[in-house]
Image (cartoon, helix red, strand yellow):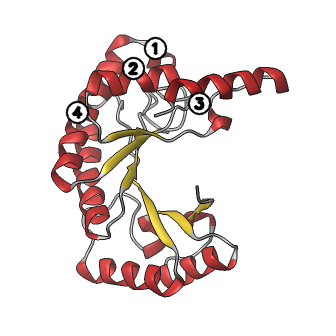
């Protein structure tokens, strides 16, 4: 296992500078964000020159690009917003393939129309899961086409809130391209030390393999 960091932890829109900072901080791998190349995180297009610049910076710094951020609100209440997000995700997935980045990370979304990381009471409605699942099916088709995996992270504010939810989604999708990104801090809102350890241990056991 290698310890990595979000590239966006470090300021800047030039890949060479950002990845040099990643290396100087002691990390050999990173989850990249296209904002670190002076582009929107979810762009309309990734020019050839941007691909070459990112690739050259990774080679020069010796930092491995192990994931690429591709988050949009997969449960947004407006289908037009979801459609635009999916289109942009396709651009990100293609960029990941061109850069030989094996994983694109996703956000399973929320009914909150203003903030994809904010909870909404309608997240528990079956229609929210259904909309997210339809988006995931389309996203997986793109991933299959480009040979890239997709990573979902259980997040209290989103549709997939737990390891059980993530396992359910993987089972429903039936694709070996769908992976779990596990951040223990996002598995609970309030818990004492013993409760937190129990929640994390159960999540690891539930999602292992």
Sort mark 2 into few (<14), some (14-19) or many (20+) by Cα contacts within 10 Å.
few
Q: Marks 2 and 1, Cα distance to the nearest angstrom?
A: 15 Å
Q: Identify which residue is drawn at 39% across, 20% down.
A: 168
Question: In the image, which is nearer the foreground, mark 2 or mark 3?
Answer: 3
Question: In the image, which is nearer the foreground, mark 4 or mark 2?
Answer: 2
Q: Nearer the viewer, residue 147 or 141?
A: 147
**Where residue 63 sits: x, y (%)?**
52, 75
**SS for callout 2:** helix
Q: Identify which residue is drawn at 49% across, 19% down.
A: 164
Which of the two labelled residues, at mark 3 and mark 4, occupies the earlier sequence position?
4
**Where residue 111 sits: x, y (%)?**
42, 26
Q: Which residue is mark 3?
A: 204
Cβ atoms at labels 2 and 3 below 8 Å apart: no
Q: Is residue 136 left or right of residue 194?
A: left
Question: In the image, which is nearer the foreground, mark 3 or mark 4?
Answer: 3
The quarter of the picture where residue 8 lies is: bottom right
Which of the two labelled residues, at mark 4 and mark 1, occupies the earlier sequence position?
1
**SS for callout 1:** helix
Sort mark 4 into few (<14), some (14-19) or many (20+) by Cα contacts within 10 Å.
some
- For residue 124, the mark is 1
Question: In the image, which is nearer the foreground, mark 1 or mark 3?
Answer: 3
Q: Is residue 162 visible?
A: no
Q: Marks 4 and 1, Cα distance to the nearest angstrom?
A: 20 Å
Q: Is residue 186 visible?
A: yes
Q: Which residue is mark 2?
A: 168
Q: Marks 4 and 2, Cα distance to the nearest angstrom?
A: 14 Å
Cβ atoms at labels 3 and 4 below 8 Å apart: no
Q: Is residue 42 above or below residue 200?
A: below
């Amino acid at each position: 296992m290698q310890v990595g960091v979000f590239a966006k932890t470090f300021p800047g829109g030039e890949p060479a500078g950002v990845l040099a900072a990643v290396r100087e901080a002691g990390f050999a791998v990173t989850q990249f964000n296209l904002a670190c190349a002076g582009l929107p995180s979810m762009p309309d297009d990734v020019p050839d020159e941007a691909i070459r610049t990112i690739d050259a910076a990774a080679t020069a710094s010796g930092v491995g690009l192990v994931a690429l951020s591709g988050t949009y609100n997969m449960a947004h209440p407006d289908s037009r917003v979801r459609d635009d997000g999916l289109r942009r995700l396709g651009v990100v997935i293609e960029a990941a393939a061109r850069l030989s980045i094996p994983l694109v990370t996703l956000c399973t979304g929320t009914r909150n129309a203003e903030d994809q990381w904010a909870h909404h009471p309608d997240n528990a409605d079956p229609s929210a899961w259904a909309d997210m699942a339809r988006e995931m099916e389309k996203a997986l088709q793109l991933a299959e086409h480009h040979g890239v995996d997709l990573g979902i992270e259980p997040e209290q504010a989103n549709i997939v809130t737990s390891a059980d939810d993530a396992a359910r989604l993987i089972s429903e999708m039936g694709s070996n391209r769908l992976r779990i990104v596990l951040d223990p801090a996002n598995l609970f809102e309030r818990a004492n030390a013993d409760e937190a350890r129990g929640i994390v241990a159960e999540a690891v056991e539930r999602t292992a393999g």
